[in-house]
Image (cartoon, rainbow, N blue to C red):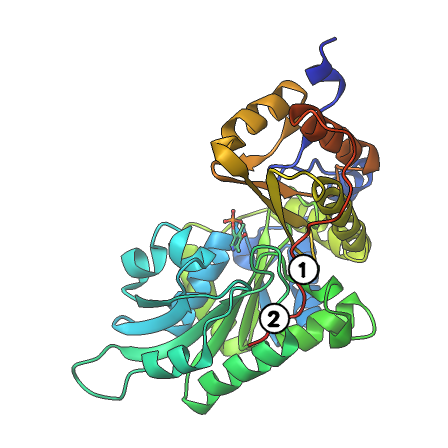
């Protein structure tokens, strides 16, 4: 067996997890029906559950986060409306321009700070007056966590408050919503209370089950009954009307029962990785509070480091900076193996003085 086969530590994304045996059992046991008829008990149970957790009237199970965000944008906005969004936000940058292509919705992207925040003054200035020259400013879209950073409650309150004051609706792309909830203890006594509190700032929230929660497939859009009714039509049009999808919903429900609180372990592993890398001079570690660690590599050596890691079964992503993501299928031994490989590459022993750039609460 090569080293590669002995150890594989896949830190490319939290989407690479395999369903656990217990999750597969839950999928096997799920009662099913045709969800386009509204008949799938497992889908209905999941939708009721996630609506309850987020404190919304209704929810809709979706095949992907991309479709969930797109249905949300199309349910909030009409042709000729615009939505305000971060320049690097997933919905704007990484979803193939779906809002513009399929929704005839004009994005108004704004520069973001290090924590993903758009300046309140920029948001205010971007909201267009009601004038025939302008698109109708209709929606503000935020993302939490953003690059692994949980947004501060103060910022969420200010940004969504401004939007509401100016008559805009608000949507949260919460692909890693529960990572944010777990990493924002001031939002609530436990992860579910924190989730409800964070969701409370927004008219709609999209959450992914297929990232840190470890389900194989699926997201949910949560919002008012009226919004979800509109989103249901868009989901059908976009090809997201699934049939016995309870087999997937059961995995998501299992994840809500068993994989939310444990996200704290992923966050601790990311910290372990960040601390272990911090002593290496050639690296600048941008430590997140959740499950993502970004590392800038000096002297253009990132591709060589990436190749070295891959040879030893450690997978990451990145070209200039590397990105490592912890998840359900990584443990301490895996992180320590990854650290040993990085140290080996730089020909050093374990690090000394920490050089982690603190990613503390943002100053907005
Ligand atoms: C992954 C992700 C999504 C949705 O991705 P899908 O692959 O379509 O499920 C949306 N927003 C953010 C921030 C993401 O990381």
Q: Nearer the viewer, residue 282 or 236?
A: 282
Numbered mark located on residue 362 in the image: 2
- Which image quarter: residue 261? bottom right
* Residue 326 versus residue 303 in the image, above or below: below
Q: Tell me residue 54's x, y (percent).
A: 67, 71
* Residue lying furthest top: 1
Mark 1 sits on what residue?
358
Asked if the residue under mark 2 is in contact with the one under mark 1, i.e. CB atoms within 8 Å, the reply is: no
- Which image quarter: residue 131? bottom left
Numbered mark located on residue 192 in the image: none
* Mark 1 to mark 2 CA distance (whole Å): 10 Å
Q: Is residue 188 visible?
A: yes
Q: Tell me residue 100's x, y (percent).
A: 29, 60
Q: Nearer the viewer, residue 72 or 7?
A: 7
Q: Nearer the viewer, residue 93 or 62?
A: 93
* Residue lying furthest bottom: 165
Instruction: Determine whether, in the image, residue 173 is placed left or right of residue 140.
Output: right
* Residue 270 versus residue 169 in the image, above or below: above
* Local secondary structure at mark 2: loop
Q: Nearer the viewer, residue 14 or 71?
A: 14
In which quadrant will I find the N terminus? top right
* Residue lying furthest left: 133
At 46% from the left and 56% from the top, the residue drawn is: 90
Task: Assess disc 2: are there few (<14), some (14-19) or many (≥20) residues with their C-alpha within 10 Å of its C-alpha.
Answer: some
Task: Assess disc 1: are there few (<14), some (14-19) or many (≥20) residues with their C-alpha within 10 Å of its C-alpha.
Answer: few
At 70% from the left and 50% from the top, the residue drawn is: 213
Q: Tell me residue 359's x, y (percent).
A: 65, 61
In which quadrant will I find the C terminus? bottom right
At 46% from the left and 91% from the top, the residue drawn is: 165
Q: Nearer the viewer, mark 1 or mark 2?
A: 1
* Residue 355 versus residue 157 in the image, above or below: above
């Amino acid at each position: 067996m090569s080293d590669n086969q002995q150890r594989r530590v896949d830190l490319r994304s939290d989407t690479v997890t395999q369903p656990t045996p217990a999750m597969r059992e839950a999928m096997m046991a799920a009662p099913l029906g045709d969800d386009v008829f509204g008949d799938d008990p497992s889908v209905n149970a999941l939708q009721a559950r996630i609506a309850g957790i987020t404190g919304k009237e209704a929810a809709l199970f979706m095949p992907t986060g991309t479709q969930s965000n797109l249905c949300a944008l199309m349910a909030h906005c009409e042709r000729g409306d615009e939505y305000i969004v971060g320049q690097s936000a997933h919905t704007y940058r990484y979803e193939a321009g779906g809002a513009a292509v399929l929704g005839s919705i004009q994005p108004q992207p704004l520069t973001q700070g290090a924590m993903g925040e758009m300046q309140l003054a920029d948001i205010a200035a971007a909201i267009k007056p009601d004038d025939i020259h302008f698109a109708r400013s209709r929606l503000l879209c935020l993302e939490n966590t953003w690059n692994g950073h949980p947004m501060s409650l103060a910022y969420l309150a200010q940004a969504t408050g401004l939007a509401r004051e100016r008559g805009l609706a608000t949507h949260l792309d919460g692909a890693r919503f529960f990572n944010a909830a777990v990493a924002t203890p001031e939002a609530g006594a436990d992860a579910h209370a924190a989730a409800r509190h964070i969701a409370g700032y927004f008219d709609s929230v999209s959450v992914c089950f297929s990232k840190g929660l470890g389900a194989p497939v699926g997201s949910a859009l949560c919002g008012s009954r009226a919004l979800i009714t509109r989103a249901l039509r868009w989901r059908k049009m976009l090809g997201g009307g699934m049939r016995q999808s309870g087999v997937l919903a059961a995995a998501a429900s299992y994840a809500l029962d068993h994989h939310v609180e444990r996200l704290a372990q992923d966050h601790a592993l990311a910290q372990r990785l960040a601390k272990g890398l911090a002593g290496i001079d050639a690296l600048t570690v941008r430590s997140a509070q959740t499950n993502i660690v970004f590392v800038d590599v000096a002297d253009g050596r990132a591709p060589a480091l990436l190749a070295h890691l891959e040879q030893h079964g450690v997978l990451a992503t990145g070209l200039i900076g590397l990105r490592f993501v912890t998840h359900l299928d990584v443990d301490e031994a895996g992180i320590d193996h990854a650290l040993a490989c990085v140290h080996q590459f730089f020909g050093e022993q374990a690090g000394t003085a920490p050089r982690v750039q603190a990613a503390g609460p943002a100053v907005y």
